[in-house]
Image (spheres, rainbow, N blue to C red):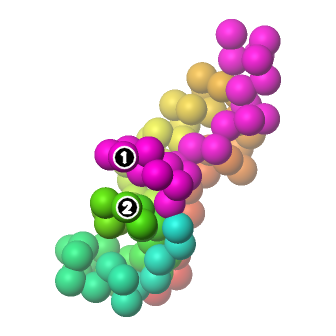
């Protein structure tokens, strides 16, 4: 099914809020400060925020696992399957 509908080329994982499905917008540490655990704020510089429900997202270990699952399911290449941690 994934190949028949070329889902690998169309996939845009992690671009929408899992709570309300609104498109996410980039956010920095200032937005995340006080809203995420300090260790997350230390490890990551880039976040995504839902402008509607204000939920925050970052590319943590859960995202890495989900990218691997999606890569197998819809044939995303390695570059799409790899989550990268931000430098300190």
Q: Nearer the viewer, residue 60 or 53?
A: 53
Residue pictured at 31% horizontal, 73% vertical: 40
Cα distance in 3D space between marks 2 and 1: 8 Å
Q: Which mark is residue 52?
A: 2
Label total for image: 2
Magenta stretch holds residue 12: yes
Is 15 drawn above or below residue 11 in the view shown? Answer: below
Q: Position of residue 38 (x, y in %)?
A: 22, 81
Q: Residue at x 44, y 45 (%)?
A: 21
The main secondary structure of the magenta stretch is: loop
Element at label 1: loop
Picture coordinates of residue 18, whole percent (x, y)? 38, 44
The quarter of the picture where residue 43 lies is bottom left
Give the residue furthest to the front.
52
State which quarter of the image contains the N terminus.
top right
Instruction: Answer whether labels 2 and 1 touch (C-beta < 8 Å).
Output: yes
Q: In the visual, does 65 lie left or right of 11?
A: left
Residue 37: which quarter of the image? bottom left
Residue at the disc numbered 1? 20
């Amino acid at each position: 099914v994934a190949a028949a509908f070329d889902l690998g080329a169309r996939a845009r994982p992690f671009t929408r809020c899992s709570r309300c499905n609104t498109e996410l917008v980039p956010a920095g540490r200032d937005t995340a400060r006080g809203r995420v655990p300090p260790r997350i704020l230390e490890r990551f510089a880039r976040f995504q925020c839902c402008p509607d429900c204000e939920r925050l997202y970052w590319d943590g270990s859960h995202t890495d696992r989900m990218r691997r699952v999606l890569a197998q399911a819809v044939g995303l290449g390695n570059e799409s399957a790899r989550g990268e941690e931000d430098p300190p």
